[in-house]
Amino acid sequence: MPSIKTRFTYRFIRAVQKLNKNRGVSSSMKETYRRYHMIRVASYASMASAVGSKRAWSQAVLRKIRNHTLHRDLKKKCGIHALIRRRKVSENPRNNLNFHQENDLRKLVPGGEDMDFCRLLNETAHYIKCLRTQGLHPKTQLLER
Amino acid sequence: MLRCAQSTASSPEKCTVMGMDIDMSVLERQRAVLQRLYQQQQLQSLQPQEANMNPLFHQNMSNMLLEKYQQCLDETNLPSFPMYGRGFACPERTSGSHSAVSNNSSMTKHDHQISSSALKRDRTVSNTTRKRKAEFDVEEDCKDKGTEREAGEVQSEITVKTDRETSTNNSSKESVQKPDYIHVRARRGQATDSHSLAERARREKISKKMKYLQDLVPGCNKVTGKAGMLDEIINYVQSLQKQVEFLSMKLATLNPRLDFSIDDFFTKEIPAYIASFPTQLQVPNPSSLQYNQLQQGALSCGVDIAMNPSQLLPQKEGNSSVPITEVYHDSSSGHQAQMLPTWDSEWQNLFNGGFH
């Protein structure tokens, strides 16, 4: 079973290849910005799919991307299940010890709005580990060309 | 501790000699429990009694044990409880065994604890039983017109709530000869009702996770306190995300020059590998198959680009994709063939959708 790192590297490089294949020749600002956006989405998506659906944050990332591509206007945030979960989380007095920092953390970690604090910490730890490989490993390789 | 318990158990007559009105059935039950406890202790080759008990035992509690204990308590009337406690205390005092805890209350607590811990040691359970224990305690509280006894008590144990009259006698914090306790140990001056117990358990879980996060995030050691650490974590996550953005921006600007052609590269190798592939493999594209079958052994962390390619890949000078594939093949290990194609197809769908 290959590690998350290899899976991510593989998918990401394939995605970038595809991007490069299909791009136009122009290197305008707009085109560059678009490429940047695509590459960033590719990075997160390949990381999330390398992790799989085991983690809540990877699920949230994939869901977001899927919804964004399929239904531009439909946001998963407004789904009824998400609303119920979030209400439960916000009403729970235990979850409001360090309210501001918790909120910020929830905004940072994908899918963090719907979890209680304990689970949020779990997801944050895994997310940090994956972010590290995402930011370092394949990109630096590619950039050294 | 066990000695005094044993002596107590084996000599209920002593209590009667003292003129106490002890419920004999309860004592017999206690004796049975204590005997079992003793046997178990022998079996498990515990550390000497003076040593602290195995913390693992603290987590053992089952519904059945609760019921048993409940039974014991049920059959003794409430008014007899103080006497019950005193009854146990008396032999301790007369025996003068040093193993008895220094003060009255602790001893009486011990006896309760011995029975409960004996019961507890019978089973091994998960932490979910803690909740049941909490419920049980709430029951006990209601029964005992609960004042917060634990406020003044040393090492108050959950099982000892029934022992109210001794709450005032505590002074020392001796933990040596106590039998195995249940999971959560209340510290001095802390409440032990079910809610605060659950709260405390949750808080400990959270602090454990925060410690783990502290190891992950560099530079978090200097900051103490939850708020500061959370700030550090947030900053770190933000900086990591910014790094991803920065690198992807760099890739976007630099890459027009590079010409990745892994797919082309792979297609050349297809005929050589097709024969070795299992037939049921679905091949969305050749590159994934290639990737599946390449077994390069251990993963190397910082993949060396200058590493020699495997014998499967012919060198191609001037093709910038070669180093990339080297990176891949050198770092690939056994790969689940079935998983990759499905993920790939999903990913392709995702990405194709997003591309247009």
Image (tube, coloured by chain):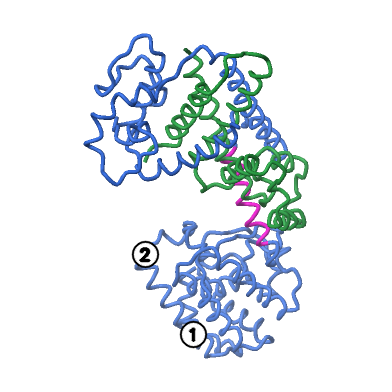
Chain colours: A green, B blue
User: Mainly helix, strand or loop, the magenta region?
Assistant: helix
Q: Disc 1 designates what residue? A: B29
Q: Is residue A63 above or below residue B222?
A: below
The answer to whether residue B111 is left or right of residue B138 is left
Q: Quadrant of residue B213?
A: top right
Q: Up-down: is B94 above or below B207?
A: below
Q: Chain of mark 2?
A: B
Name which of mark 2 and mark 1 comes first in the sequence: 1
Mark 2: amino acid: Gln
Quarter of the image for the N terminus of chain A: give it.
top left
Percent coordinates x, y for residue B217 in the rendering: 59, 32
C-alpha separation, residue under disc 2 versus residue under disc 1: 22 Å
Residue range corresponding to the magenta coloring: B197-213
**Relative to B180, B247 lies left or right:** right
B265 over A53 or under it: above or below? above
Q: Residue at x 30, y 19 (%)?
A: B309
Image spot of residue B121 (x, y percent)? 46, 69
Q: Is residue B14 left or right of residue A32?
A: left
Tell me whether circle 2 and circle 1 mark residues in contact (CB < 8 Å).
Answer: no
Q: Is residue A113 above or below residue A88?
A: above
Residue nearer the viewer, A135 or B167: A135
Quadrant of res B72: bottom right
Q: Residue furthest top?
A: B318
Count of numbered circles in the view: 2
Question: Both on one chain, marks 2 and 1?
Answer: yes
In the image, residue B111 lies at what x, y percent?
Answer: 55, 74
Depth check: give the residue in front, B179 or B20. Answer: B179
Q: Secondary structure at mark 1?
A: helix
In the rendered image, which residue does mark 2 sit on?
B44
Name the element at disc 2: helix
Q: Is residue B356 magenta?
A: no
